[in-house]
Image (tube, rainbow, N blue to C red):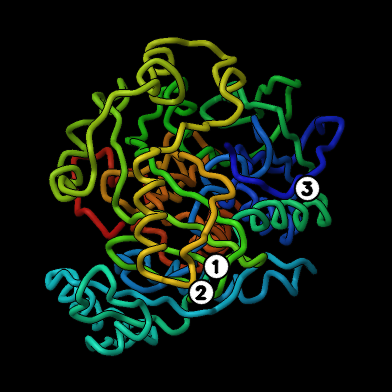
């Protein structure tokens, strides 16, 4: 079952021409549209399904600075500042709260890794504290494991996956953006090495710039124009409970991760438990992703599923040239892993006696699109002038979404970049440079 997302109205007619077309109605696409519109640019936002229908509504909702790769830290700091102001600026609640994040573990190596990150925290002014055994047990009961310690990231928090992308889209609309759902992008119009427009299933739009913020579909869309973007998706499982007693706002341990939502329900999952499905696109980029796969071998299972024959990494996507492929797959909605659902519910119920009667409202699967180094791409694309990419968020896209959108708007409008964009260039993944795998 797909997560419930606030619905957003579509504009009836495509504009004939705009300054920028944004492909993708997730958190990155809607944030980009919003910040472009705030700068006075005309924008058309295209979404083949509905706003927030794929990964942006299937996330845990975390907005964190803790444990991020240092390359992402300036972007994370920017994002948190933007999250602070969005509700006031737009006039609608996105569910953002600086609740703090609590981590506990019985793994000495994991605890040492958190301790080793503290110099990064000090460098960037992130307030974070190590917890001793007693402090960790006070926050998450030791009914299943004996904690060695934990961590409290004070100023991090959460936002509401059902609201964030829709509210950003509605904020963009108040500034003149048009929103077109059920309207897939088909192909770019490129003249003399520069984009001049885009063909969609509803017609043609002239544009000076195109931003591809298509999530798991980005590599497939760019490939038909001869552009290589190494990308792979892992399949994850999460669930939402019915409203329940408050045992904490944002909690992590090896047995579960929990995020309390505005209505008192919880989003729950087990961190690191994902399936890397063998696909034609995955085989194509196997060399680029091998360092990451080796590093995370114990956490990710290999599998073979329907993604081999359908979806953005399938045989048809790799070898076919169907301009309507995106229309055939309005929403990527993989089945959840029943075993993981049962496991996380058992883990939470046995940890918190007050949640013994906890009930599932619904569950879902999701494809998290990754880059070989687990750092997003936010970049212009040479040699095509006016074409930009913001994708490959590697499970970090929700919390980083506002910052990614802001930086994308900087690049598109030739403004001074708000953070150094060097680490986010597409060229790093395709020029043969050694890949340094970041944090997930």
Please give left or right for residue 82 compared with residue 182 in the image: left
Count how many numbered circles sit on residues in the image. 3
Q: Which quadrant of the figure contains the N terminus?
A: top right
Give the image location of residue 30, x and y in percent.
65, 50
Viewer-proximal residue among 347 and 190: 347
* Numbered mark located on residue 1 in the image: none
Callout 2 secondary element: loop
Q: Residue at x 42, y 44 (%)?
A: 237
- Tell me which numbered mark, 3 or 1, is placed earlier along the sequence: 3
Callout 3 secondary element: loop
Q: To which residue does mark 2 refer?
A: 249
Q: To which residue does mark 1 refer?
A: 260
* Numbered mark located on residue 177 in the image: 3
Q: Quadrant of residue 359?
A: bottom right
Q: Residue at x 66, y 46 (%)?
A: 4
Callout 1 secondary element: strand
């Amino acid at each position: 079952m797909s997560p419930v997302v606030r619905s957003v109205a579509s504009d009836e007619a495509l504009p004939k021409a705009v300054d920028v077309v944004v492909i993708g109605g997730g958190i990155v696409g809607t944030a980009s549209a919003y910040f472009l519109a705030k700068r006075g640019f005309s924008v058309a936002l295209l979404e083949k399904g509905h706003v927030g229908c794929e990964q942006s509504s299937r996330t845990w909702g975390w907005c964190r600075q803790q444990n991020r790769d240092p390359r992402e830290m300036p972007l994370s700091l920017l994002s948190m500042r933007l999250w602070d102001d969005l509700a006031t600026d737009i006039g609608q609640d996105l569910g953002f709260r600086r609740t703090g994040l609590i981590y506990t573990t019985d793994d000495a190596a994991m605890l040492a890794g958190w301790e080793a990150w503290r110099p990064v925290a000090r460098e960037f002014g992130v307030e974070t504290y190590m917890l001793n055994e007693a402090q960790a047990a006070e926050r998450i009961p030791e009914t299943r494991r004996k904690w060695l310690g934990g961590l409290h990231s004070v100023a991090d928090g959460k936002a509401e996956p059902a609201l964030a992308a829709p509210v950003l889209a509605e904020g963009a609309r108040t500034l003149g953006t048009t929103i077109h759902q059920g309207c897939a992008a088909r192909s770019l119009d490129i003249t003399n090495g520069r984009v001049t427009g885009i063909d969609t299933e509803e017609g043609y739009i002239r544009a000076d710039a195109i931003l591809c913020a298509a999530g798991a579909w980005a590599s497939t869309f760019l490939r038909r124009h001869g552009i290589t973007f190494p990308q792979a998706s892992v399949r994850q499982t999460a669930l939402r409970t019915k409203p329940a007693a408050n045992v904490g706002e944002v909690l992590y341990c090896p047995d579960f991760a929990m995020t309390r939502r505005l209505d008192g329900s919880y989003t729950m999952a087990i961190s690191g438990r994902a399936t890397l499905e063998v696909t034609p696109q995955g085989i194509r980029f196997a060399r680029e992703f091998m360092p990451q796969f080796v590093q995370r071998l114990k956490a990710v299972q290999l599998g073979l599923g329907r993604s081999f024959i359908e979806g953005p990494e399938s045989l048809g996507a790799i070898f076919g040239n169907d301009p309507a492929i995106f229309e055939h797959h309005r929403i990527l909605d993989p089945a959840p892993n029943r075993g993981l659902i049962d496991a996380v519910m058992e883990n939470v119920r046995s940890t918190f006696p007050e949640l013994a009667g906890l009930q599932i409202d619904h569950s879902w699967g999701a494809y998290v699109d990754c880059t070989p180094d687990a750092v997003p791409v936010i970049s212009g694309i040479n040699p095509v002038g006016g074409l930009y990419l913001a994708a490959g968020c590697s499970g970090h896209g929700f919390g980083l979404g506002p910052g990614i959108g802001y930086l994308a708007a900087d690049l598109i409008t030739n403004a001074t970049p708000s953070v150094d964009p060097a680490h986010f260039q597409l060229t790093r993944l395709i020029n043969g440079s050694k890949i340094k795998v970041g944090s997930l």
